[in-house]
Amino acid sequence: MSKDKNVTIDGAKIILTIHYNWGEGDVTLSDWLHDGPGSRPLLQPVEAQDKASGGNLPLSVIPFRYRNTWLSRMLIRLRIIQDPWNA
């Protein structure tokens, strides 16, 4: 993600791929930011793509606290960062 704090990202234009135990699913960044992993707390995005071009994007397009990685979950449990879905 850009270091410019004024840059905004249109979450509807970014598609995230989520690996489930039964296969893969896609969700927009906007939906992920709103809903998160739901009842499966260990789910996390594994790929990001630009919806228009289909080009791969770095996972850093997802704000850190929404990535649901082991590190972000630990920092949330330690109350270092705010839980985005149970705020």
Image (spheres, grey):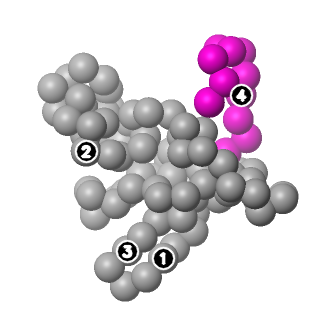
User: Badges 3 and 2: C-beta atoms under 8 Å apart?
Assistant: no
- What is the crowding at mark 2: few (fewer than 14 residues within 10 Å), some, or many (at least 20)? few
Q: Nearer the viewer, residue 9 or 38?
A: 9
- What is the crowding at mark 3: few (fewer than 14 residues within 10 Å), some, or many (at least 20)? few
Counting from the top left corner in percent of width and height, residue 44 is at 39, 56
- In front: mark 2 or mark 4? 2
Residue 70: which numbered mark, if any?
2
- What is the crowding at mark 1: few (fewer than 14 residues within 10 Å), some, or many (at least 20)? few
Q: Is residue 61 left or right of residue 13?
A: left
Q: Residue at x 47, y 65 (%)?
A: 18
The residue wearing badge 3 is: 20
The amino acid type, in three-letter code, at marker 4 is Thr
- The stretch drawn in magenta includes residue 53: no
- What is the crowding at mark 4: few (fewer than 14 residues within 10 Å), some, or many (at least 20)? few
- The stretch drawn in magenta includes residue 2: yes
Magenta-tinted stretch: 1-11
User: Badges 1 and 2: C-beta atoms under 8 Å apart?
Assistant: no
Q: CA distance from mark 3 to mark 1?
A: 6 Å
Q: Is residue 20 above or below residue 51?
A: below
Counting from the top left corner in percent of width and height, residue 45 is at 46, 56
The amino acid type, in three-letter code, at marker 3 is Tyr
Sequence-first tag of 3 and 2: 3
